[in-house]
Image (tube, rainbow, N blue to C red):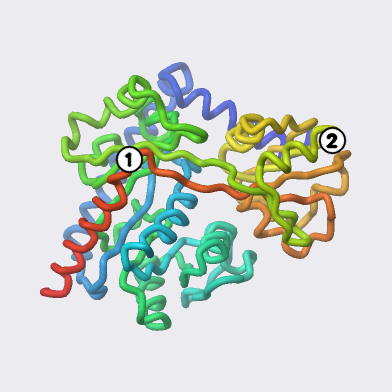
Amino acid sequence: MNLITLRTQFERWLQRQWQHRGVWAWTMAPFALLFGLILKLRALRFQYVHPSHRQIKIPILVVGNIYIGGTGKTPVVIALVKQLRAFGWQPGVISRGYGTHIGDHPLVGQGMVDAKMFGDEPSLITHETGAPIAVHPNRHQACLDLLTQFPQINLVISDDGLQHLRLPRDIELVVQDVRGTGNGWLLPAGPLREPVSRLRDADALLTRTDDAPLQEKKQSTLLAVTHHHNSNLRKTSIFLQICQFRHLSSGRMQDPATFSSSVTSLAVTAVAGIATPEKFFSSLRTIGISPKQVLALPDHFSFEQSPFASLDADVIVLTGKDAIKCQDVTDDRLWVAEVDMRFSDPEFLPWLDHQLRIKASRLCRD
């Protein structure tokens, strides 16, 4: 058993522990209390020692989470960039650039950028949307540099950054999945980067339900924990659907029904280097593709050493996040499952547009 497999199995085990208050949670509870104290001290330091000075005069929309790891933030950012354009916005995006080694100055780019330099998620966002993007651990500086190079931007969307206190923000969207808030405890006893009470400051809670909107009863159960914190919290479900398959080397497209039919008699392997690989594998099964084998890789897997040569497969299906790092891989078996994010509430985007316009008007007057 190699290190990748061991890491993947440990992460799955830890996720299971975080769904209830068992031995692991109670053993780690003192460390969670310490973590909570550190969060409070950090917030106080930024409030009193580093008071905010607003240099950016356009709205900043933060898409984040309080549950550690992947909950679907990046697909939400991609969907928002595409759909808010229809309301007249010209968005730019900022990101941390996980796993990259960025110097003193942010990297700014647009369209096809090097995933090794920018990171997989920022590269996917700008590739899918064409939006300008800036990457740096200091998101505030990334925002300033982005606006310097692309002055036509009238909205900045931050991919993650809910906990980045240095970054001013006008709208906060918190993304969760069907795990909700787990056992409700902070790391390491639970999965939360911030306490559930943090939701009182958010503007909307988006619950990712993968392939279809949640039944009303399940939605109510997931959201009940937030009701007493913020009665004005806008709540809606979001879901990802595979909309097409793209052959990586040739670029030719097939709709899900055609692709599913074409691989029925072939040995298909599904590969995912994302936070929750099983979600991807499940989405393939939902549209009638049953992989002969699946390969779950760690989140943000670099693909510097290709795992494909050892796979006994006729067809290999990747996520978009993984495919962006495999542009130079020569393997005719590789296909990319491209997805589309939907909002179950048809009034959500008009509501968001209205809120952003209110913020933009206030910023113009300041």
Q: In this view of the protein, which residue sits in the foreground, 152 or 252?
A: 252
- Please give left or right for residue 72 compared with residue 251 in the image: left
Q: Earlier in the sequence, mark 2 or mark 1?
A: 2
Looking at the rendering, which quadrant does residue 329 occupy?
A: bottom right
Which amino acid type is marked by label 2? Ala
- Disc number for residue 95: none
Across and down, in percent, residue 224 comes to 27, 25
The residue pinned by badge 1 equals 345
Which amino acid type is marked by label 1? Asp
**Mark 2 or mark 1, whichever is nearer to me:** 1
Instruction: Identify which residue is drawn at 38% across, 67% down.
Output: 91
Inspect this view and state whether residue 89 appears.
yes
Up the image or down, 355 lies above or below 231; here it is below
> Which quadrant, please, contains the C terminus?
bottom left
Instruction: Identify which residue is drawn at 47% across, 74% down.
Output: 106
- Disc number for residue 267: 2
Instruction: Identify which residue is drawn at 45% across, 23% down.
Output: 19
Q: In this view of the protein, which residue sits in the foreground, 186 or 159?
A: 159
Q: Residues within 10 Å of mark 2 (few under 14, many from 20)?
A: some
- Please give left or right for residue 287 compared with residue 97 in the image: right
Across and down, in percent, residue 141 comes to 37, 73
Instruction: Identify which residue is drawn at 73% across, 43% down.
Output: 259
